[in-house]
Amino acid sequence: MSLNKGSRAVAACAISTDCKYIACADKHNDHNVFVFEVDSGDLVMEQKGGPDEIMDMTFTCAEGSYDLWSAGKKHMVYWDINELKKKKCIYGESGVATSFAACTADD
C-alpha cells in the first residue's frame, strides 16, 4: 500500500479488529484520510481531513463494524467508510473545541 504523491508522511494509523482494513492520515496540509483493504491492498476511501492535524485514529471493537474516528488539534471526527462520509463531533452547548492527543473505542 502506498499513499498518493505529495502525502508527505503518515501522522496516524489504525487497524480494524479483524485486520480487514487499515486506515491512516497523512501530514499534507489537507490531512487526508485513507482506508485500505488489507488482503487486496485496494484503496477503499480517501477523504480530506481538514486543516487541523490528525494525531490518532481508531476503529470500533464491535464485531462486523468498521466505524472509524480520528482525533487531533481542535477536532474529533467520525468516518463512515461505507458511505464515504465524515461527521465532526459536537462539543456541547458552549461549542468550544478542544484538542485530543489520542482516541480509543470499544464495542
Image (cartoon, grey):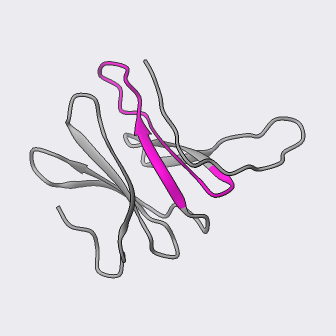
Is residue 69 left or right of 87 when viewed as pictured? Answer: left
Residue at (61% x, 46% y) in the render: 76
Q: Which residues are magenta?
A: 54-75
Q: Would you place residue 95 above or below residue 29 in this image?
A: above
- Residue 96 picture location, percent across and down: 83, 48
- Taking the magenta stretch, the answer to whether it contains residue 51 is no
Is residue 17 left or right of 90 when viewed as pictured? Answer: left
Quadrant for the C terminus, please. Answer: top left
- Residue 95 picture location, percent across and down: 84, 45
* In the image, farthest residue toward the left: 39
Asked which quadrant contains residue 8, the reply is bottom left
Looking at the rendered structure, the number of numbered marks drawn on it comes to 0
- Residue 72 picture location, percent across and down: 58, 54
* In the image, farthest residue toward the right: 94
Quadrant for the N terminus, please. Answer: bottom left
- Taking the magenta stretch, the answer to whether it contains residue 66 is yes
Out of 59 and 100, give the one closest to the viewer: 100
Out of 3 and 86, give the one closest to the viewer: 3
Out of 71 and 84, give the one closest to the viewer: 71
Is residue 32 left or right of 99 when viewed as pictured? Answer: left
Residue at (44% x, 70% y) in the render: 27
- Residue 93 picture location, percent across and down: 88, 36
Asked which quadrant contains residue 14, the reply is top left
* In the image, farthest residue toward the front: 101
Is residue 107 left or right of 3 when viewed as pictured? Answer: right
Q: Would you place residue 70 above or below residue 33 in this image?
A: above
